[in-house]
Amino acid sequence: MGTRLRMLISAVVLASWVLSASGARYHNHRHHRLQDVALTEEIDARAQRNKRATDGDYDHSALLPADAPEDSGPMAPGGDPSDLPTCLLCVCLTGSVYCEEVDPDMTSVPALPKETNYLYARYNKIKKITAKDFGDIVTLKRIDFTGNIISEIEDGAFAKLTMLEELSLAENQLVKLPMLPAKLMSFNANLNKLKTKGIKANAFKKLNKLAHLYLAHNELEAVPFIPETVRTLHLQNNNISSVTVDTFCKGNDTYYIRPNMNEIRMDGNPVILGQYPNSFICLQSLPIGRYQ
């Protein structure tokens, strides 16, 4: 009887441990699922608040800063949307601000929360970027202004953004480029109105980390200076009519091999690449374009 009793007690203890462990695993799994659901609901809720921002049926004070004046509130009919707090017009998550297709129209760069890392302000009506827009936000790593109507960027607008790695100004109306941050790794200015005279000779010279450069669908007449770090270069659908031995290679060094560049698109330009065979001898692969 003593042996059977000990075996019975051991079985009861083991079963209790198994049930306890299973319950803990279930609790942890359920906790993570609830976290995911909460994040999704927060995004949806903010989107709904943004939609109702100007309808007068939402308590706007909930998203105002603690030190906001007492008369801060919803925008008056016919008012400027820039008067609304950024995180009421946009979706603000930790370190990221999403201001995409804002209604009412967003016509200028919004005031950003401190320590913003990523700004997505695509498909709005932003017209100009000033030197004051990013004055205190030195933590930015990525900015995307794709699909606005930007025609002017003041010199120095990006001067303080020493951590900026990715910048997209695609699908705008730029005719010239400002000075760009030195640590850029990716720059996109596709689908603008850029001509060669609108890009300074040294515009990309000091960008010694630049790996991806997109200047397609513009009005460039010549290939700008391209840093040796660039791997991807898109110049298709411009007005480039010729290249030289120094465009990609070094005319005075026939042994030079360009180490990084593995994709060059020049299709859609009037240049006949087959007329300039010595211009590509340093490349590991030929540019995409017309050779006859």
Image (spheres, rainbow, N blue to C red):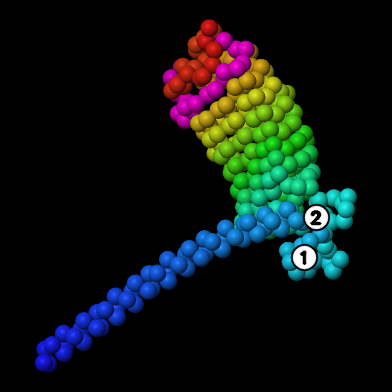
Q: Nearer the viewer, residue 236 or 204?
A: 236
> Counting other residues with Cα less than 10 Å from the Cα at mark 2, is it few (<14), some (14-19), or many (20 or more)?
many
Task: Tell me, yes or no, if residue 5 can be seen here.
Answer: yes
At x 81%, y 59%, the residue is 56
* Horizontal and vertical percent position of residue 231: 50, 31
State whether residue 40 is above or below residue 167: below
> Counting other residues with Cα less than 10 Å from the Cα at mark 1, is it few (<14), some (14-19), or many (20 or more)?
few
The image quadrant of residue 41 is bottom right
How far apart are the two marked residues, 2 and 1, measured between alpha carbons?
11 Å
* Horizontal and vertical percent position of residue 292: 53, 7
Q: Nearer the viewer, residue 30 or 162?
A: 30
Mark toward the start of the polypeptide (2 vs 1): 2
Stretch of the chain drawn in magenta: 252-272
Residue 124 shown left or right of residue 236 in the figure? right
* Horizontal and vertical percent position of residue 134: 72, 49
Q: Which disc, if any, is residue 59? A: 1
Magenta-drawn stretch contains 269: yes
Q: Quadrant of the N terminus?
A: bottom left
Magenta-drawn stretch contains 83: no
State whether residue 269 is above or below residue 39: above
Q: Which disc, if any, is residue 54? A: 2
**Helix, strand or loop under label 1:** loop
